[in-house]
Image (tube, grey):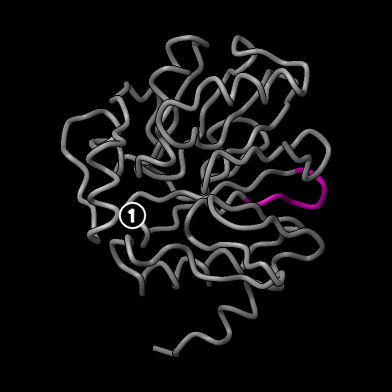
Amino acid sequence: MREIVDGVFELGLGFVNVHLVVTDDGVVLIDTGLPRRSKQIERGLREIRKQIGDVRTVLLTHNHFDHIGNVADLRQRSGARVFAHAADAPVITGAIRPEVKGLLPRLIGKVMTAEPTKIDQLITADESEPIPGFTAVHTPGHTRGHVSYLLDRAGGVLFAGDTAGGGKDGTLVSGPKQVSADPAEQDRSVAKLATHNFEHAVFGHGRAMSGRAVERFREYASALPKD
């Protein structure tokens, strides 16, 4: 467990990160990690003197199994409200099967599947406010309904999900495009995020960034091919 800024924590669950935000109304989870990792999330909560019952909201970035793996269990045990974009909702609720690209992801997906769950509120409007202090930015490409979240705290904290990733040398790298629905659109979403202002950025995969993190997004966007 690592504290990024005051009250914002990153918990590594294998190759994916889960983020916890302490607010006046309880704990907000951004994504829930790989399946069967609820106990690790529970231990992480205890590290910050919280418990499952303190989780009030789960904000999902997208419908891939390594991000929604524990949402059904956590929703049932905590009573938290789950938010996700309407375009990704059918996979999360189990109405349709996920479309997985790549041999290795398909093989992993056969043994690691996320239990379907109800979504309490659909995100449909871009740059809406699902809960106080958070802005939901529609960033399609990795999935059609991928959402990044901006938290109004400490100069701005971006939860980028899999739109982009943090490189080992502090640079911004692409999110995992081998399993992306539309890699070109994913790059356009990075450029969209670069128009906002934030000091810190955290990712589903890779290292967090602090100190004018938006500048790395702008550098990445400036190097993209022009339409």
- Residue 212: horizontal and vertical position, in percent? 78, 65
Above or below: residue 226 compared with residue 25:
below
- Neighbour tally class for label 1: few under 14, some 14-19, many 20 plus, Cα within 10 Å: many
Horizontally, residue 164 falls left or right of residue 207, namely left
Q: Residue furthest left?
A: 96
Horizontally, residue 157 falls left or right of residue 203, namely right
Residue corresponding to mark 1: 143
* Residue type (three-letter) at the residue carrying disc 1: Thr
Horizontally, residue 137 falls left or right of residue 101, namely right
In the image, the segment drawn in magenta is: 153-158
Q: Residue at x 41, y 38 (%)?
A: 123
Quadrant of residue 215 in the image?
A: bottom right
Q: Residue at x 33, y 54 (%)?
A: 143
Which type of secondary structure does the marked residue at label 1 adopt?
A: loop
Horizontally, residue 102 falls left or right of residue 27, namely left
Quadrant of residue 199 in the image?
A: bottom right
14 or 164, which is in the foreground? 14
